[in-house]
Amino acid sequence: MSSCVYVLRLGRDMIWFILTLLLAVGLTVQFAGHFSCSDTAIKVGAYFQIVAGFFALYRGFAYVVEDSFQRSVLPVFRFPAQLRHPLQKIPIGEPGVIRGQ
């Protein structure tokens, strides 16, 4: 299942690509460590997940800052397919409400 999610989310940006790769590798190594009763493999898998957590924090912060300033401040290294077809921003909220109030 994780490989399907990994392939489907490949087109977003490089940070998301690395994040899902680290999560998939970390969980696979941890599964192998639990299956073989290896403490070292479990710790290595945990380190992969810790690094993935830092990538997730960076990506979240980058998108919050981008939404606040209406321009890209921190790079997320978008793929060319994402640059050609950006996500549509749907205006949400009550009519007449200005962003930042």
Image (cartoon, rainbow, N blue to C red):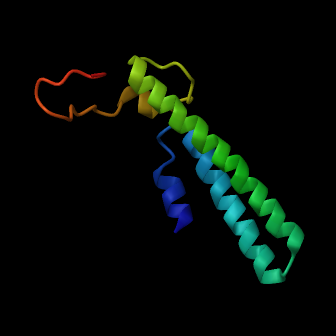
Percent position (x, y) of residue 29? 75, 67
Residue 4 horizontal side relative to residue 86, left or right: right
Residue 62 horizontal side relative to residue 96, left or right: right
Quadrant of the rendered image containing residue 2: bottom right
Would you place residue 84 above or below residue 3 in this image? Answer: above
Residue, x 10% and y 28% (percent of image)? 95
- Quadrant position of the C terminus in the picture: top left
Q: Nearer the viewer, residue 62 or 82?
A: 62
Would you place residue 19 above or below residue 66 in this image? Answer: below
Quadrant of the rendered image containing residue 40: bottom right
Q: Nearer the viewer, residue 54 or 26?
A: 54
Q: How many marks?
A: 0
- Residue furthest to the front: 101
Residue 34 horizontal side relative to residue 71, left or right: right
Percent position (x, y) of residue 34? 77, 78
Residue, x 55% and y 30% (percent of image)? 76
- Residue furthest to the left: 95
Would you place residue 11 above or below residue 61 in this image? Answer: below
- Residue 14 visible in rendering: no
- Residue 34 visible in rendering: yes
Would you place residue 65 above or below residue 12 in this image? Answer: above
Q: Nearer the viewer, residue 33 or 4?
A: 33
Percent position (x, y) of residue 18? 63, 44
Residue, x 47% and y 31% (percent of image)? 63
Residue 68 horizontal side relative to residue 45, left or right: left
Percent position (x, y) of residue 89? 28, 31
Residue, x 44% and y 33% (percent of image)? 81
Quadrant of the rendered image containing residue 59: top right
